[in-house]
């Protein structure tokens, strides 16, 4: 056994598993989460709370892990409702992963960061890697701290830890887990199930996004790039930027009568601090990053897959895709 994926039951984990299985062989991959029954497509799965350092060390020893994809986290929306939980899971969890990796001589660690590292003092219309890191959420604070820890463990212990600052991630297989960009998934689930959607951000809210296929490919490309090409712990990456109104226009190409209403809630203030357009030229230069999915390609793939899903399975059948709320 070689690869550990904590947080494997979440939005990104549930799709990264297939890619990791393909590359390493499914027998070589251990998937963990708080509730392992949420994890699909895994030969080996176990319960693991990443705040439990002893349990983490025990799993790494028992399964002879030598590479980790650390996806366990509390996202921004849930994190602002419960900042103490976000601090505990994101800070203690990440520290435990790095410490266990150091102690056990783990070869490589991947742990995502987020555009939430940015906040006050940035140029939102063009946010580069070197923009100030002054987040306005506890989630952002934990992501900046994690990036600083990545730098420290790389410099002090020569640990090969790599990270990407993901924008809002769009995917159809698994419900997003409490982020402030979840509207960009919910809007598609509503479009294929009913004729309308009520957005929790304003129609002119512009944010950067990535479609899941690009997310998975970016992780694979980063993790297989030669170590000498990796010149920073965490890289900006992006796919496309769009306003909520532009999502609606893109969806109306397929559902002309689709209606969107706007009732902004507490998440509006969170995203108002985030970049609108990300400059990811370091990722493009250092390891040839290039996204493939723009807004319309994302819409087409989301609508095709969700339409097929909702006509072939019932939401109460234990599937990962729930009904839009
Ligand atoms: P998610 O919420 O869908 O999944 C996170 C998983 O972590 C869940 O399955 C949850 O059960 C698990 N978890 C929570 N607390 C835990 C604990 N104490 N121990 C073990 N597992 C625990 O999130 P995701 O979207 O899959 O995000 C994965 C990573 O990518 C996170 O670090 C997140 O910050 C980052 N990210 C996600 C997005 C996005 O839009 N989805 C954007 C930027 C960064
Ligand atoms: N999409 C994520 C969130 O909203 C950004 O990290 O929390």
Image (cartoon, helix red, strand yellow):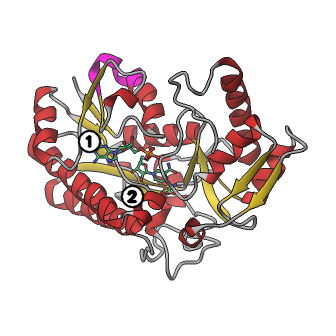
> What are the residue bounds of the magenta stretch?
21-30
Considering the numbered disc 2 on the image, is that residue within a helix, a strand or a loop?
A: strand
Q: Nearer the viewer, residue 271 or 150?
A: 271
Q: Is residue 226 magenta?
A: no
Q: Is residue 22 magenta?
A: yes
Residue labelled 2 has its Cβ within 8 Å of some atom of ligand 1:
no
**Residue in view at x 52 percent, y 42 percent:** 215
If the image is split into quadrants, where does the C terminus sit?
top right
Residue farthest along the front direction in this orientation? 316
Figure quadrant of residue 304: top right
**Mark closest to the chain's N terminus, 1 or 2:** 1
Residue 8 position in % (x across, y down): 37, 35
- Residue beneath label 2, please? 234
Figure quadrant of residue 64: top left
**Neighbourhood count class around disc 2 (C-alpha, 10 Å): few under 14, some 14–19, many 20 upward:** many
Q: Nearer the viewer, residue 285 or 17?
A: 17
**Residue in view at x 32 percent, y 30 percent:** 36
Q: Is residue 254 left or right of residue 190?
A: right
**Neighbourhood count class around disc 1 (C-alpha, 10 Å): few under 14, some 14–19, many 20 upward:** some
**Residue in view at x 52 percent, y 45 percent:** 176
Q: Is residue 156 left or right of residue 293?
A: left
**Residue in view at x 84 percent, y 46 percent:** 258
Residue labelled 1 has its Cβ within 8 Å of some atom of ligand 1:
no
Residue 160 position in % (x across, y down): 25, 48
Q: Which mark is residue 108?
A: 1
């Amino acid at each position: 056994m070689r690869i550990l994926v904590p947080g494997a039951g979440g939005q990104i984990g549930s799709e990264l598993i297939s890619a990791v299985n393909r590359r390493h062989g499914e027998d070589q991959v251990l998937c963990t989460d708080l509730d392992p029954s949420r994890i699909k497509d895994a030969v080996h799965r176990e319960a693991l709370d990443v705040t439990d350092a002893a349990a983490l060390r025990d799993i790494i020893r028992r399964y002879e892990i030598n590479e980790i994809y650390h996806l366990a986290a509390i996202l921004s929306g849930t994190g602002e409702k419960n900042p103490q939980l976000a601090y505990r899971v994101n800070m203690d969890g990440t520290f435990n992963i790095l410490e266990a990796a150091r102690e056990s001589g783990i070869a490589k660690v991947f742990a995502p960061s987020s555009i939430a590292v940015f906040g006050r003092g940035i140029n939102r219309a063009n946010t580069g890697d070197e923009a100030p890191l002054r987040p306005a959420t506890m989630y952002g604070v934990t992501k900046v701290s994690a990036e600083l820890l990545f730098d420290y463990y790389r410099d002090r212990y020569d640990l090969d830890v790599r990270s990407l600052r993901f924008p809002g991630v769009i995917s159809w297989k698994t419900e997003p887990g409490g982020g402030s960009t979840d509207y960009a998934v919910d809007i598609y689930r509503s479009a294929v199930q009913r004729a309308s959607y009520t957005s929790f951000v304003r129609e002119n809210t512009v944010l950067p996004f990535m479609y899941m296929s690009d997310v998975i490919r970016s992780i694979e490309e980063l993790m297989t790039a030669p170590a000498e090409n990796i010149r920073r712990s965490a890289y900006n990456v992006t796919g496309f930027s769009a306003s909520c109104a532009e999502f609606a226009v893109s969806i109306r190409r397929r559902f002309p009568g689709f209606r969107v209403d706007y009732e902004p809630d507490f998440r509006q203030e969170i995203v108002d601090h985030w970049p609108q357009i990300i400059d990811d030229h370091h990722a493009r230069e250092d390891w040839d990053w290039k996204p493939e999915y723009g807004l319309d390609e994302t819409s087409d793939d989301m609508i095709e897959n969700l339409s097929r899903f909702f006509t072939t399975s019932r939401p109460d059948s234990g599937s990962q895709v729930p009904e839009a709320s």
